[in-house]
Amino acid sequence: MRKFLGSLFCLALAVAAPGAMSRGFNRLLDAVVRIDVREVVFDEGTRRFTGGVGSGIIISPEGLILTNAHVVSPQAVEISITLASLERVGARLVGWDHWTDLALLQLDLGEVKKRGLKFTHAPFGDSAALHIGQEVYAVGTPHGLTRTVTRGIISNTGRYFEDSRGVRGYETGSYNTWLQTDAAINPGNSGGPLVTEDGSVIGINARTYIGAENLGFAIPSDVARRVADQLVRHGRIIRSYIGLVPGVLQDLEKFYSLPGNTGMLINSVDPGSPAASAGLRPGDVLLALNGAKVDGRFPEQLPPIQDQIARLPVGSKVALRVLRGGQPLDVNVVTEQLESHVGEEWAFEKWGLSVRKVSRAYARENQLADSTGVIVLGVQPGYVAAEAGLGRGDIITKVAGQTIADLATLRKIHDAYAAHPETLLVDAQRGHRISFYVFKP
Amino acid sequence: MRYFFALSSLLAGLAVGRASPLPELFRERLKSVVAAEFFVQTEIERRPTFVLGSVIDDRGTVILPGAAIPPGIAPAQFKDFKVYRPDSAEPFTASYLGQDAFTGWHFLRVEEKLRTQLVPITRWVGTGGEPALGEELWGIGLRAKEEDCQPYLLSAKVGLITRLPQQTAILLADVAGPGLPVFNRDGRLVGLAQTPFGQNYLLFSHTQNATPVMLVNVEESSVVLLAAEVLPYLGRIPQDVQGRPIAWLGVYGLQPVDPQVAKFLKLENQSGVVLSDLLESGPAVQAGLQERDIVLAIDGKPLPHFKPDRIGAAYFGQEILRHRPGDKIALTVLRSNERREIAVTLGDEPRMVREAARTYYERLGFTAREFLVNDSVVQRIKPAEGRGVMVHFVKPNSPAATAGLRPDDWVREIDGEEMKTYDQALRKLAAIENDAGRTQFVLLVSRGGETTVLRAKLN
């Protein structure tokens, strides 16, 4: 043991020796920012404001900043950027994409100009060219400690990590793999860059395993670049959806009598989705997508296949060749636009009720007939909704005889109630069981 | 029957006439209580159960509370029923007669030679009616088998009499073992102690402040179902071990209407039950009932308001079970502000989990059971779409468990082949189980609307 510690000590000395970092690295440090966010949340029956701290990297002379979607979301009401020069300046959200956990901000250039502030931006590296064992640095604001640099290596270049609630309850990780690093990543590092010694951004740090040692994950810069590019142009990423949930074929090739290195297992088909309407079934094995062979035997191979579908234009026809019961079968599916299971949120303050719209995806996941209604996120004790007996998770489908097809309908009823309070009958379901409630002034 | 009652009240009269002191009453009434022990045989173990019961007739019939036996267990799984008298270690055999759907009671019949030593609780019936608020009642508790089921006295005052939905007295302290009779000072039967309610407490410790906890005394109860809600139903001895026939409406969502909603709907001094989850082709649907209909009355009798509201749904459910399959009932429902009368012919409850055919595959590590009508409600599909088999049990650390199979998973395909019937699945599973050369099998299962392909390795 003593010997081991000794050798570790020598190693530390050896690395400390080389001296100054590259010019590129110093320039990069100047492009890293701290992000303070004030945002609105709609829990517990009301609209509340909370704050958070994260990191970001300036990527263009126009003051565009990349960060994580879980740092800045559309619910942000105030974004404050601390530049390397220790000047604070406001920013706006250009767009976000929870699927890749990325958000794009832009510095308030008017303010920058007026105050004569200076900033630099960092160049992107090539994340596809990274090799395992390559030395990398993470820069950011862990636990609020601004401008912290940690060092490690690339531990894996194509880690699969998918989480259906991973970014503020939104889905993430279905369309990209992650860089894994042992550079220390802590809460607050989120949105900061993972860079090489020359100061090129090769990833955006996003998450870590809490309780594990040095298992950090970053979005590869090749993904970040493409997402940033589209967010600048369209403000959002539009993806195609067909409703296939892939599964790993690993070890099942023999069972399905598949020729080497082919196929992706269809683990589940979302009810009512284009794939379901086209007759695809769980247990089918996808062999080819628009004529191109598919190889999805291992988890890290799934996101690129999913992305291939997502990149198709919405409403386009996809030719799928699947294997069912040993027989190949050709199926055409028309894509629709991908939607999150998290719908728009709102708080109705006269009722002490905060809600989220039922989305198509939520309705499918929860076996609801359609996307009618809003889900109760919270009720404020002592207010109308709580007194009526509503609780978190109830789905309000009708108020005063009107079907709640969208939030606007409910806002209108709420506004009318605020002006002239009168007793309303509310239809809601809890676990598919219907109950009635009354909102009483 | 009339003769029997006359005789029993005469005897009781004599007993009371002597103004027996409590110890004597206590000793006499011990003849009406027993402890029952049995084993539940599962796929991999025998679970012992020890419960208390009351003797209800001269034929050695004993009732156990509904909660004494968890639901879903097939009667064939009950093994070695034994009955013990208080203060005795001598076991007597008993047979299981079944569960009555209306009362929930399980019925046992003890062996011949014990019967003469028992006295039914009906012997202690009085004429006094309901106990008064604050009246002191007493009952019997029985210690565990290891202590020879030693009897002891419990007593408490009546704190509340309420409808849950049956007339129930709640006492200020535990008054009897659950399932055992409760008496007044004169030794007259007042009711039957029920499965106890939980009581809310705050737990303080050195590291934590005030954690809310609920405590349930499983050995004694302060909840007493009054005699008027017990005696009329003692004759409901199941004719068949499954407790059939059982009346069935085919509605799975019954939500009570709270007083605010009732007032809004202009329902004076009454309540209602909102219907949802109506089974397609069930009796309710065939009669024309719809989701969101609010039932206001059964056969013209308005649904009373209960506290808490949810008792209203239990009441409605019980009123259905009071009937027999084929009975016609008239429901008054409110549908979009309009009252209408709907005549429903009640059906026969479809096969229940405890009746379902099932087969355990030791090597695969799970029990498959047939798909039931009730499963289609849970899976949110039409009954006609219910194919395949349900997973009833998964053996820990078995190939099935390692593959991720869970109880209540719906198996739709086995080795890529769609399972259309239970028998087909049995053949398929048996073939895999018996094929020593098999190294794996693949299941397509549904869980909460999502499907997944599970692969199990055999070795």
Image (cartoon, coloured by chain):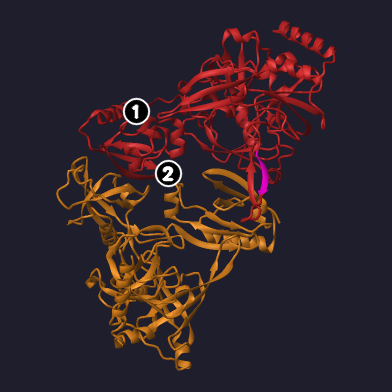
Marks 1, 2 in one chain: yes
Residue A70 shows in this picture: yes
Query: Residue B386: horizontal and vertical position, in percent?
Result: 38, 33
Q: Is residue B362 left or right of residue A379?
A: left
Q: Choose the circle earlier in sequence order: 1 or 2.
A: 1
Does residue B200 show up magenta in the picture? yes
Name the magenta segment's main secondary structure: strand
Q: Which residue is mark 1?
A: B422
Residue projecting furthest to the front: A2
Q: Is residue B458 left or right of residue B375?
A: left
Badge 1: chain ID: B
Amino acid at circle 1: Tyr
Residue projecting furthest to the left: A259
- Which is nearer the eye, B77 or A365? B77
- Chain that is orange in the image: A
Q: How many marks do you count on the picture?
A: 2
Residue B346, placed above or below residue A12: above
Query: Residue B79: horizontal and vertical position, in percent?
Result: 48, 20
Badge 2: chain ID: B
Residue A181 shows in this picture: no
Amino acid at circle 2: Gly
The magenta region covers B198-202
Q: Which residue is mark 2?
A: B448
